[in-house]
Image (tube, rainbow, N blue to C red):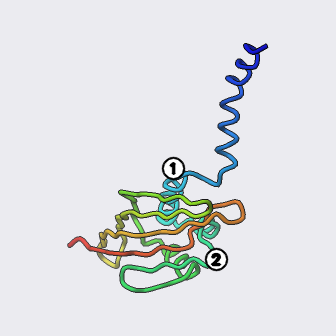
Amino acid sequence: MQKINAALLLLLAPLLVLHAQVSEPADSVFVVTLNQQIEDYVVKQQVEPLSKIYADDFVFSHGSGKVEGREGWLKSVAKGNFLLRQHDSVTVEMHQELAIVRGKLSVHKNNKDKIDRYHLKYFRLYAYRNKQWQLISHITTSEWHEK
């Protein structure tokens, strides 16, 4: 009987681990993937999926000092000037229903007759709301442009 119980436990262990992963809101790998997926949507001007990921109270603090909300940022995305938005050196600090993300972002953007290339460091705050992760804040802490 003990051998049968041990065998059942071995067979069920992967399912128990899977259940534990599904019942958790997310892990840091999921948040890093979502963080880059957002940028891919921005480059492709896919406003509809972004409107679900950006929280209604989303605040974007740019390196220039400009602060805008969700609707203003989505209008910028819809213009389609972004050619590249790529994350680097991303770290995630997970809390029960919050994720604090730090990283670098490289951006290539059409600007009239030239392409602006710049890099920035940022903090992002994600919150787990209504059974999904939403970006609620992006704060650029430094920004530098290529010449």
Which residue is situated farthest in the front direction here? 2
> Which quarter of the image is occupied by the N terminus?
top right
Name which quarter of the figure residue 49 lies in.
Answer: bottom right
* Pointer 2 residue: 56
Which residue is farthest bottom? 66
Q: Residue at x 36, y 57 (%)?
A: 88
Indicate the position of residue 56 as horizontal and vertical percent values: 64, 77
**Point 36% across, 83% down: residue:** 64
- Judging from the image, what secondary structure is the residue with disc 1 in? helix
Residue at point 47%, 71% (across, down): 80
Give x and y (percent) for residue 134.
60, 66
Residue pushed farthest left? 147
In primary-sequence order, the first of circles 2 and 1 is 1
137 horizontally vs 88: left or right: right
Please state if 97 lies on the left or on the right of 107 as rendered: right
Residue at 71% x, 19% y: name it.
6
Residues at circles 2 and 1 in contact by the CB criterion of under 8 Å: no
Image coordinates of residue 90 in percent, x first then y, are 40, 57
Q: Nearer the viewer, residue 139 or 70?
A: 139
Q: CA distance from mark 2 to mark 1?
A: 24 Å
Amino acid found under the numbered disc labelled 1: Val
Residue 30 position, x and y percent, is 55, 51
Classed neighbour count for the residue bearing mark 1: other residues with Cα under 10 Å, few (<14), some (14–19), many (≥20): few
Q: Which residue is mark 1?
A: 29
Q: Amino acid at mark 2?
A: Asp
